[in-house]
Amino acid sequence: MTTLEGIIAYPITPFTSGADATVDTGALTALVDRLVGDGVHAVAPLGSTGESAYLTEKEFDTVLDTTIAAVAGRVPVVVGVSDLTTANTVRRARRAQTAGASAVMVLPVSYWKLTDREIACHYAAVGAAIDLPVMAYNNPATSGIDMSPELLVSMFDTIDNLTMVKESTGDLSRMQRIAELSEGRLPFYNGSNPLVLEALRAGASGWCTAAPCLRPEPCLALYTAVEDGDLARAQALYAELRPLLEFIVAGGLPTTIKAGLGILGSDVGDPRAPLLPLEPEGRATLARLLSAA
C-alpha cells in the first residue's frame, strides 16, 4: 500500500476562455510540473479545489490523464473520485487505477443525508472495486455529511484498503479521537488550512492543501520545521502564512487560487459557473498578501 506523508498539493483545474471553455491541458501540465519541481510530496487532482463537481466525465478523465502524465511517476498521485452515485464513484475509481493513480480519495456526496450504514456500504463498494488505497475524506462544509471518528475507524477496521483519513472539519479533537480509537493505526491528514500547525504537531501524517499553488516554499518549510522539532521556526512560518490561508479558505479555494495564479502571471481561466471570479476588492487584497510575502 502507498504510504503518504508531507505536503499533498491540490491543483486547480484550468479552463480555456470563451463560451465553450474546457480543460486547459497545457496550463494544467505546467502547474503540476511546477508543484512537483517545487518539492511537494504528492499531488491530488480532482478534489474540491479542482472543481470536480463541475466537470463532465470526459473532462474528469482528461484531468486525470493529464495529471498522471505531468507527474510522470515522480511523486504519488491521489485522485479525488467522489460523485453523487456509488456507481459513478466506482467508475472514476477504476479509471484512476487504470490511469496509474497511487490512491483515491472519496468524499461522501449525496442529495439525501446518508446514514452511517449507507456511507459504509458506499466506501465498501469502492474499496472492493479497486486494489488502490482509499482515503476517506470528511468535509461536511462541502458535502453536508459529517463522518464521526467512530464511523471512520470502524470502516478502517472492516474495509481492507481504506487506509487513510483526510479530516477537514477544523476540529483538532476529531484527529485526536481517530488516533485514540485506532490506537495510532489509522493515519490522518489535515485538510483545514488554518489548523495546519496544530494538526501537524498532533501527529497528522500530512497537510492536504492548495496553498502550494501560490506559496510552495513556506508550506514545505513549515512541514519540515515540525518534522525537525523546530517549533519556533514552525510558528514563524505559520504566522507568515496564516493571513493567506484564512483568505483562500474564506473566499473559496477554486476562486481564490485561480485569482492568485492570475496575479502571479499564470492564465488558468475562471472558475466554472455557478462559481464566479474573485471580485476586484478581493483581488486587491490577495495581491497585497502575495506581494507582502
Image: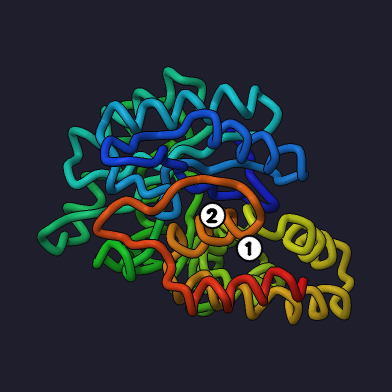
In the depicted structure, whether residue 266 falls above or below residue 138: above
- The x and y percentages for residue 179 are 55, 66
| Residue 276 pos. (x, y %) | 33, 62
Mark pair 1, 2: CA separation: 10 Å
Question: Under tag 2, what secondary structure?
Answer: loop
Residue 207 is at least partly visible in this image: yes
Q: Which amino acid does label 1 sit on?
A: Ala
Quarter of the image containing the N terminus? Answer: top right
Q: Quadrant of the C terminus?
A: bottom right
Query: Which residue corresponds to mark 2?
Result: 186
Q: Quadrant of residue 89?
A: top left
Label 1 vs label 2, nearer the camera: 1
Give the residue drawn at x 76%, y 75%. 292
According to the picture, the residue beneath numbered tag 1 turns out to be 204
Horizontally, residue 142 falls left or right of residue 156, namely left
Looking at this rendering, what residue extends furthest in the left direction? 112
Residue at 43% x, 32% y is 63
Residue placed most toward the observer, 240 or 163: 240
